[in-house]
Each structure stands twice: as structure tokens, then as C-alpha cells.
Image (cartoon, rainbow, N blue to C red):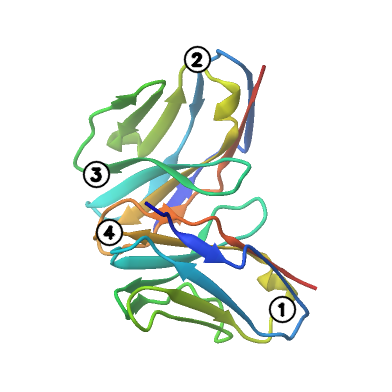
Amino acid sequence: GAGVSQSPRYKVAKRGQDVALRCDPISGHVSLFWYQQALGQGPEFLTYFQNEAQLDKSGLPSDRFFAERPEGSVSTLKIQRTQQEDSAVYLCASTPALRYEQYFGPGTRLTVT
Amino acid sequence: AQKVTQAQTEISVVEKEDVTLDCVYETRDTTYYLFWYKQPPSGELVFLIRRNSFDEQNEISGRYSWNFQKSTSSFNFTITASQVVDSAVYFCALSEGGSEKLVFGKGTKLTVNP
């Protein structure tokens, strides 16, 4: 079966541009997570959905970051007015139920110039 | 607040050596979950193990073994007879009982030389 997929894999944006990153979780997985991984660091939690409900967005660094999962499947992470400090790999993960291990996608590497 | 510390930034070994990756965690919850993930050069995080706070039994899976000690808040990972394919960054992570999110350590980069 297919794993978690993310697109695009690489994105270069000029400072001030808006970007949208897509995550397709494993079919049937209830929970979906977004993490940000800076170079040489561990992933840091951004936000979490259970079905279409966003249950925790405590990790979003500013109001320029917005995530949605309108039909409880595909999710989009949007970053408005990108800044250089937004440059990172954005990882998506899904899990079939509570307390299960999270399955990660390959990530989207965002570079803001 | 929850925290995971991986004090070893980089480790380099020669093939067939045994190597232990350290993980120390902090949490105030009595119910929590610990994880290890592998991130090879390709970048995708690969799940290795999950352990809940009520199960202190050590686990062995092939060349991999994990030692969970609540008394020292540690969850260490040992690779026996290391191989070049084990070269990767390894992350330890913690999830508290009331939250689904994972808190990761900074990772340990393991290089296994032939």
C-alpha cells in the first residue's frame, strides 16, 4: 500500500510569497500531523488533526501559518508572506488511531530566498 | 514540560562494532510513550519502536535492542554488529498521555564505516 505522500518535494519561494504544501496520508488514517525540521535538528510539532478537526495548533510559529484538512483526508499547510526563517523541511505524518506510531512522509524542503 | 535529550551528536564506528545511542527524557506524566525513529540520508523518518511507560521490559528485534529504565528516565538503543546500512540519524521521541504530538530529541548521527 502507498505510504504518506507529500508535494511538492522541493519548493523555492521568494521572501513574501505565499506557499501551500500538500500531504496525502495513508488511506483510512484518522490522525494527521505536521512537523517542521530545521537543518540538523529534530522535527518540531506544528499542528494535529483528528479527521477534519484541528485539535492542537499550539506549535504553529505565527499567524502566517495555517493548516486545514477539510474532508478528513488530504491536508494543506499554508504559509503566508514567507520569511527566511521559514526555510526548513516540513514533514507530514499519519496514524490509524490514537497512540499508534506515526508514519512519516518524505517531507517538503522549503527554501525561502 | 516534556523534553528529550540525546547527548551524543555524532558517533562513528567501524562495521561489526556494537553501538549504543543514549536517550534521556523528562515528563511529569505517569502515562507516556517513547519512540525511536531512523532518518536515513533519503530523509524519510522510519519508525523503529514504541514503548509505553508501564512496560519496562527490554526488547530485542534482530540486531536492535532497547533498554528502558524509568529510574533513570532513559530509553537507550543498541545496535549489535553494526552495518554500513545502519548509517543514519536516529531520533528518540516522547509523547505524553494527554497529547498525541511527538517531542523529538535533536538526534544522533551514526556513521558506520566499512
The chain that hosts pointer 2 is B
Q: Secondary structure at mark 1?
A: loop
Please, is residue A102 above or below residue B18 in the view?
A: below
The chain that hosts pointer 3 is B
Figure quadrant of the N terminus of chain B: bottom left
The chain that hosts pointer 4 is A
Tell me what residue is drawn at x 49 percent, y 77 percent.
A76
Residue A42, position as x, y percentages in the image: 55, 52
Front tag of 1 and 3: 1
Please, is residue A32 above or below residue A62 in the view?
A: above
Mark number displayed over residue B81: 2
Residue on which disc 1 sits: A83
Q: Are marks 2 and 4 on the same chain?
A: no
Q: Residue furthest right?
A: A113
* Residue sitting nearer the eye, A105 or A100: A105
Residue B109, position as x, y percentages in the image: 61, 37
Q: Could you tell me how far apart the alpha carbons at marks 2 and 4 are, in whole angstroms?
A: 34 Å
Left or right, B94 with respect to B13, comes to left
* Residue sitting nearer the eye, A103 or B3: A103
* Residue sitting nearer the eye, A110 or A44: A110
Residue on which disc 3 sits: B53
Q: Is residue B101 visible?
A: yes
